[in-house]
Image (spheres, helix red, strand yellow):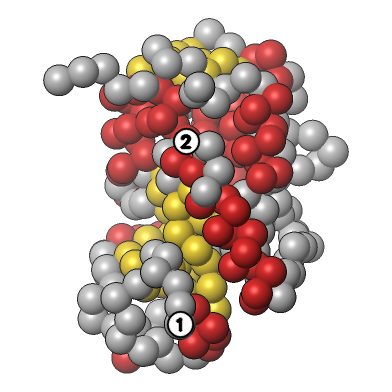
Amino acid sequence: MGTIDARRALLARLIDHAPTFPPASLPPPEALAEDAHAAASPHAFVLARLVWPASSLAQLASSDRAVSAVLDAPLPEDARVESVETRDVVRDRIPSHVTEIYVETPVDDGLEDRLDHLSADGLRAKVRCGGPEVPGDADLARFVRSCRERGLVFKATAGLHRAVRGDGEHGFLNLLAAVVFKGDEEDALAETEPEAFGLDAAAFSWRDRSASGEEIARVRRGLFHSMGSCSFFEPVGELEALGMLPP
């Protein structure tokens, strides 16, 4: 068995593309064109599912893209829907074939209790990293640690267009470092120096810590699934500028 390329282990299917959602808010025809452009790009391996409102699935009649449906209405039986994103779990609104259900979880005093319930019910968590209320480094680190302790898979959304933290916004490399490097979650999230991160075929590194492709793949499977972004090309452009994408 060959060694896993750390770049692909870290970045493969990382971005759940949500072009109709703010701040991009593209009309459906433009959103689908942008998603097709992403799927045809040299870095399409970074692209995961198309995030789409459940109420508007009819707009995807001609698309065969795998979908993560935001549950704003009951879902029809549709084989393209691989996951559901919701704030409240209403089982009779979710088709039986969908096994990945992400429940948006505020980082507040009730966090641990909510995560206990999600874990017991076989659900997954979703954390919002941007918007009107941006969680601080300590709060986001607490979320990551709490999911790790419970073996609970999560996804992140909002405000993760930048690779590295700056101007009050979280960086997606920071979040990846927080999930990969157990015990250093808060310091990894607070990092503001791009030079502190490294990624090549052999390893993903931050400061004096390093992880192989195999180690990264385990964390991606068992803890951090993906991040929702209204833009595909903005975060990919950040990775290109850092020289972190495979040729």
Residue type marked 2: Leu
Q: Residues within 10 Å of mark 2 (few under 14, many from 20)?
A: many
Q: Is residue 196 above or below residue 178?
A: above
Residue type marked 1: Ala
Is residue 170 at all visible to an observer of this figure?
no
Are the residues flagged by discs 1 and 2 in contact, CB closer than 8 Å?
no
User: In the structure shown, which secondary structural element does the residue marked by tag 1 occupy?
Assistant: loop
Q: Residue at x 23, y 76 (%)?
A: 97
Q: Residue at x 36, y 89 (%)?
A: 76
- Expressed as whole percent of the image width and height from the top left, the position of residue 19 reads 64, 64
Q: CA distance from mark 1 to mark 2?
A: 29 Å
Q: Residue at x 50, y 22 (%)?
A: 247
Task: Answer with left or right where residue 203 lies relative to residue 173.
Answer: left
Quadrant in which residue 198 is drawn:
top right
Q: Residues within 10 Å of mark 1 (few under 14, many from 20)?
A: few
Point out which mark residue 179 bears: none
Q: Earlier in the sequence, mark 1 or mark 2?
A: 2
Residue on which disc 2 sits: 11
Is residue 214 at all visible to an observer of this figure?
yes
User: In the structure shown, which secondary structural element does the residue marked by tag 2 occupy?
Assistant: helix
- Expressed as whole percent of the image width and height from the top left, the position of residue 120 reads 26, 65
Q: Is residue 123 above or below residue 247?
A: below
Residue on which disc 1 sits: 61
Q: Nearer the viewer, residue 31 or 127?
A: 31
Q: Quadrant of the N terminus?
A: top left
